[in-house]
Image (tube, rainbow, N blue to C red):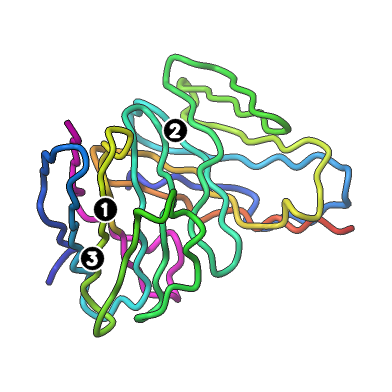
Amino acid sequence: SQQGEEDPQALSIQEGENATMNCSYKTSINNLQWYRQNSGRGLVHLILIRSNEREKHSGRLRVTLDTSKKSSSLLITASRAADTASYFCAIQAGNQFYFGTGTSLTVIP
Amino acid sequence: GAGVSQSPSNKVTEKGKDVELRCDPISGHTALYWYRQSLGQGLEFLIYFQGNSAPDKSGLPSDRFSAERTGGSVSTLTIQRTQQEDSAVYLCASSSPLTGVGGYTFGSGTRLTVV
């Protein structure tokens, strides 16, 4: 399967703490993408990291990519209650997207 | 049908013209999503339908963009007075609401080029 797999499946932290989510995949990739989805809403693109990149930052987000281990991590620093959502990694092949099962993040105020 | 069908697969239009993109989701999938992807970028959410209603239109970039879904099946995305920045691949996805993102099935997309 080309689908990404994420862990943990669920994560509950206090506001202000950091949250780390991991994604593993099986195929070669051109890029790996992270998305957020709030309940009943569409996906929101967070960050894209290319296969020749190892780390990327966007605001409070930090993404790492290890192509030798076929894994990526998403770190959210100084979490806020508004960060509560499901987070998905995605692998793109052509116009098809293969999403992981997601990590459900709850940030407790 | 067996998959999500989008038409046309390619569309070249002159700036200022209107275009209509069509998505035929998997039979029985009540959730339908429109996204677009510019070259080298991630998916940009446009609109989400649950049945015929659109609980989330937050991604439509301007009032030139509209979408409708009739009969809980086919959806059309209309772009009026197209601009060059509208050029992108427009992707439709459908899912059963119980399967979530992992159960998304994407269409093959419509590549829109505004010249």
Q: Is residue B75 highlighted in magenta? A: no
Q: x and y percent of residue A103 in the render?
A: 61, 53
Query: Where is mark 1, residue-wise?
Result: B80
Q: Give amino acid for label 2.
A: Leu
The residue that mark 3 highlights is B76
Left or right: B26 in relation to A88: left
Q: Which residue is at the front of the view, A50 or B22?
A: B22
Q: Is residue B37 left or right of residue A37?
A: left
Q: Identify the secondary structure beneath mark 1.
A: loop
* Residue B60 screen position, x and y as percent: 43, 54
User: The numbered mark 1 sits on a residue in which chain?
Assistant: B
What secondary structure is found at the residue carrying circle 2?
strand
Question: In the rendered image, which quarter is residue B75 located in?
Answer: bottom left
Where is residue B87 drawn, in percent x and y? 26, 36
User: Image height check: is A41 above or below A8?
Assistant: below
Within the magenta stretch, is there residue B96?
Answer: yes
Image disc number at residue A32: 2
Q: Is mark 3 on a helix, strand or loop?
A: strand
Outermost residue on the bottom side: it is: B71
- Give the magenta-colored segment's residue range: B93-115
Which chain is disc 2 placed on? A
Q: Give amino acid for label 1.
A: Gln
Task: Say whether marks 3 and 2 touch (CB < 8 Å).
Answer: no
